[in-house]
Amino acid sequence: MKKLIDQNDLNEFRARFNTCYDSVLLGFSCQTPAGMENTSCTVELRCMDYESDSGWCNLTLKFNEVTAWRFAMDVKTIYFIISDGMHIRLDEGLIYVDMGYYSDPVENISEYFDSEFFFVTKDFEWESVAI
């Protein structure tokens, strides 16, 4: 898996996957041992990939050392589409990721916590498989 650590990594990620606009959520899981300090979450998406011959991939995002997260979905939902893309912000050693609320980039960190699908993490890894 590749790590997203700094602005250069984020720029590379955005160049390849844009903002994951209109991605389909394939899977989601979180493992929370006793306490929040070692929580890890995995998100699997089908999204556009500018380096894939088909133009599409299955993208796995792994968030380790998650300090906050939320995933709220109506029980009658059959498909979950990341309609407004993914917004990522690097700030003082933390990575803020929003996948469910804002159509424009989030300006204030506090706004991430209003999203229905967000993560705050210290470690972000990703891997793609062309389809």
Image: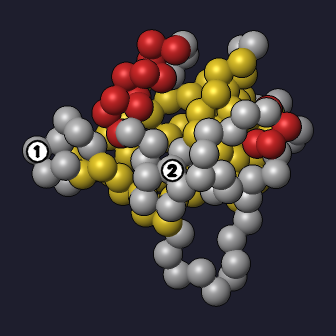
Residue 40: x %, y % from top left: 66, 39
Indicate the quadrant where residue 9 lies: top left
> At 65% from the left edge and 21% from the top edge, which residue is drawn?
90
> At 27% from the left edge and 43% from the top edge, which residue is drawn?
49
Residue 4: x %, y % from top left: 50, 22
- 10 Å neighbourhood of mark 1: few (<14), some, or many (≥20)? few
Asked if one can make out residue 58 in the rendered structure from this viewpoint, the answer is yes
- 10 Å neighbourhood of mark 2: few (<14), some, or many (≥20)? many
> At 54% from the left edge and 45% from the top edge, which residue is drawn?
86
Q: Nearer the viewer, residue 108 or 81?
A: 108
> At 52% from the left edge and 81% from the top edge, which residue is drawn?
78
Q: Is residue 79 above or below residue 35?
A: below
Q: Is residue 22 above or below residue 87?
A: below
Q: Count numbered badges in the picture.
A: 2
Give, as a three-letter code, the residue at label 1.
Asp
Q: Nearer the viewer, residue 41 or 7?
A: 7
Residue 70: x %, y % from top left: 76, 53
Q: Is residue 32 above or below residue 7?
A: below
Return the mark for residue 2.
none
Q: Which residue is mark 1?
A: 53
Q: Is residue 11 left or right of residue 105?
A: left
Give, as a three-letter code, the residue at label 2.
Gly
Q: Nearer the viewer, mark 2 or mark 1?
A: 2
Which quarter of the rendered picture does the N terminus lie within? top left
**In terms of secondary structure, where does tag 1 sit?**
loop
Return the mark for residue 85.
2
Residue 87: x %, y % from top left: 58, 40
Colour setup of the view: secondary structure
**In terms of secondary structure, where does tag 2 sit?**
loop
Name which of mark 2 and mark 1 comes first in the sequence: 1
